[in-house]
Image (spheres, helix red, strand yellow):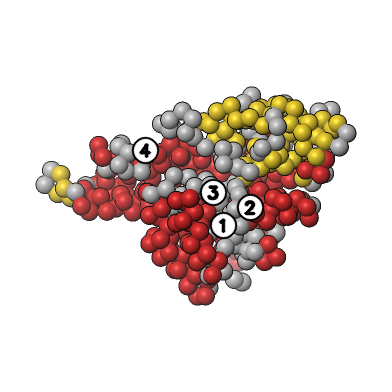
Amino acid sequence: MSWDFETEPEFQKQLDWIEQFVRAEVEPLDYLLESPYDVLDPKRNALVRPLQAEVRKHKLWACHLEPDLGGQGYGQVKLALMNEILGRSRFAPTVFGCQAPDSGNAEILAKYGTPEQKKQFLDPLLKNEIVSCFSMTEPQGGADPKVFTTHAELRGDNWVINGEKWFSSNARWASFLIAMVVTDPDAPPYQRLSMFIVPANAPGVKIERNVGVGQEPEGAGAHAYVRYSDVQVPKDHLLGTRGSGFVVAQTRLGGGRIHHAMRTIGQVRKAFDQMCERVLSRTTQGSRLADKQMVQEKIADSWIDIEQFRLLVLRTAWRIDRYKDYLKVRKDIAAVKAQMPKVFHDVAVRALQIHGSLGVTPEMPFVDQVMESFVMGLADGPTEVHKITLARQILRDYRGTDGLFPTGHIPSLREAAIKKYADRVEHEVASQ
């Protein structure tokens, strides 16, 4: 039997270096630069490129990828422990070559791309010379691809795409988009869609507007409302087989959700650390905030929430490594996704409250974190969908009863116990 909560000493040394490097060199970029995805920003490149070179030197670049693609082929547990640290900074995933959505798109291209596609799109993506966009959600469809209407028709040697996509992250900086569109409307629901590489400069690709989150100014956001009008892409820009869009999408979702969860823990820990510092630094009504029982409750609840969630995520990562089959871990992944926004929200709100009026200003990160917690409850499918998935998966392991009373009915259990041990009881009584 093996049961262990320790990290191998050699990998722990790497984690220690990552933490020191992120805190000292990467986190300051969050206060100096605009977007990690703007690869054309000379100021960004002047600061980010040397740090990426340092990460490569330590063999920690794009660790989710196999060695033949320049990564380390790390399993989900190692990646989870890394991403917990990287989540502290907006720029850290880019510095370490594992930023979303590029990481998931790279995995799709690595698995389904042709040699020509890999040379044209994957190689520069892995070097962070370009960035990409995953264009799936639709204005009327939300997170339900079964009602998508953006479609592609095969005309000669080209696919022609028409329709609209909503909240296509980083489209404004992307060199290409991976779009999930209907190709076979009469097929069964999960065989109607296909995945395509769409160059961002293809005629007919238009960003209607860039949508912000929360109080971001109009046009300043990173999530695009994209219109495809007679966009022509060559036949060889199809990823996977025709009608396999759902299968291709799963390549990027399972592990990605675990990485997302651990990066969220990194953010939550920052809020928690600031909360603890605050309560030890401020006094009111003659004593420190740390000495107030209601404040102590917030500290205790936050610590419990973080540790419980972290263990759930790590166990899920371990199960992915163990089974090498996302379907066997579907229940666990759904639980992680459902719990993530709640933990993020609850801890951020407590930190905001403890900081008083300062907490609601842009001079502290808590308002943005609270808003981000709602984004986490929608990204990669809304929380409600994951709870439904979780409940269905759980109930598969149970059976109902046709009996008049439940199987836990105490009088019935007592009667069965009496019958089971009647002879032995009579024997004991007779022998006395």
Question: Mark 1 and 2 residues: CB-CB less than 8 Å, in contact?
Answer: no
Query: In the displayed image of the protein, which residue is found farthest to the bottom?
Result: 9
Question: Mark 1 and 4 residues: CB-CB less than 8 Å, in contact?
Answer: no
User: Which numbered mark, 1 or 2, is in the foreground of this view?
Assistant: 2
The mark tally for this picture is 4
Q: Mark 2 points at which residue?
A: 125
Element class at badge 3: loop
User: Which numbered mark, 4 or 2, is in the foreground of this view?
Assistant: 2
Q: In which quarter of the image is residue 391?
A: top right
Q: Mark 1 points at which residue?
A: 97
Q: What residue type is labelled 3?
A: Val
Question: Mark 3 and 1 residues: CB-CB less than 8 Å, in contact?
Answer: no
Q: Residue at image x 60%, y 47%?
A: 131
Q: Position of residue 149 (x, y in %)?
A: 72, 26
Other residues around mark 4 within 10 Å, as few (<14) / some (14–19) / many (≥20): many
Q: Which of 337 and 63 is in front in this view?
A: 63
Q: Position of residue 268 (x, y in %)?
A: 41, 49
Q: Mark 3 points at which residue?
A: 39
Q: Mark 4 points at which residue?
A: 367
